[in-house]
Image (tube, rainbow, N blue to C red):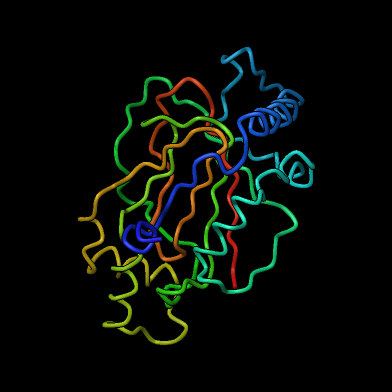
Amino acid sequence: MDHFAEHGWVRIPGAFTADDAAAMRDVTWRALESVGIRRADPSTWTKHRPDHLQHLKADPVFRAVGSVRTRAAIDEVLGGQPWAEPRDWGAFFLVFPTPGRPWSPPTSTWHLDAPYTDPLAPPAGVKVHAMYGDVAPGAGAMCILDGSHRVVHRWFVDNPQPAGTPAAKLRKALLRDAGVLDLPVVENTAQAGDVIFMHPLLLHAPPTAHTGTQPRFLLNKDLRI
C-alpha cells in the first residue's frame, strides 16, 4: 500500500498461477490461429496489435484472474470501499514484436482513462492489468510516469478548469505545464500470473516498440467505484 500510494502502481506477484496463464495463452492462440496468426510461425505476426479477440472475454479460463489473492489486493487498494466483481476481466491488449524497431520512451501518447478530477485517496477505482505472459524490459511493457497520479491531482486542485473542458484540452495543459514529463518512466514488466494495479490518475502509454520474441499478453480492466 505504501508503494501504491507513492508510485501509483503496484505489482502482485503470482496473483494467479502459471498454469492458469498458460491456459489463457492457449485459448488466445487458438483464436489468433483462426485468422491466420500462427503460434509457431512468426512470419504471420504481421499485425502489431490484433483487435479481434474481445469475444473471448466470457471464456471460463479467464476467471482465474479473479483469484482470492487478486480480490483481496483490490480490497486493500480501494481502501475497503465496496466494489462489484466484474462479469469479465477486461479487454485483450496484445502487442506483437516489432523486429528492427528500437525501444525508446514514449513522448506524446501519455494519457489516463479516468476523469482528471478523480480523488487521490482513496481512489475512485483501479486499473487492473492481468499479465498472462512474461514481459521483459523492452518487450511490450506498458509504460508509466512514476508517481504522476500525485502530480496530476495536485495540479488540477491548484489549477481548476472550467466545467465541460474537453479531456484532450486538459491533457494538453497537464503535459505542458505540470512537469509530469520530468518524472521517471517505468516499464510494467511482469511474469505470467502477475497482476499490476494502477491508480486511475496515473499517466501511462503503450510501448513505442516491442524488442522481444513473444507477444505481450495483457487483460485490461478499469474498475470504478
Which residue is rendered at x = 53% and y = 40% of the image? 194
Q: Is residue 102 above or below residue 70?
A: above
Is residue 218 positioned above or below 133 on the image? below
Compared to residue 27, the image places residue 43 above or below, namely above
Image position, residue 30 (x, y; %)? 75, 26
Number of marks in picture: 0
Residue under the point 60% across and 50% down: 69
Who's the residue at 54% across and 48% down the image? Answer: 129
- Quadrant of the image for the N terminus? bottom left
Residue 104 placement (x, y as % from top left): 29, 36
Residue 64 vs 29, above or below: the answer is below
Residue 185, image x and y in percent? 29, 47
Picture quadrant where residue 116 is located:
bottom left
Q: Quadrant of residue 163?
A: bottom left
Left or right, 218 with respect to 183, comes to: right
Q: 117 or 165: which is nearer to us?
A: 117
On-image quarter of the C terminus: bottom right
Q: Quadrant of residue 73?
A: bottom right
Q: Position of residue 138 (x, y in %)?
A: 37, 31
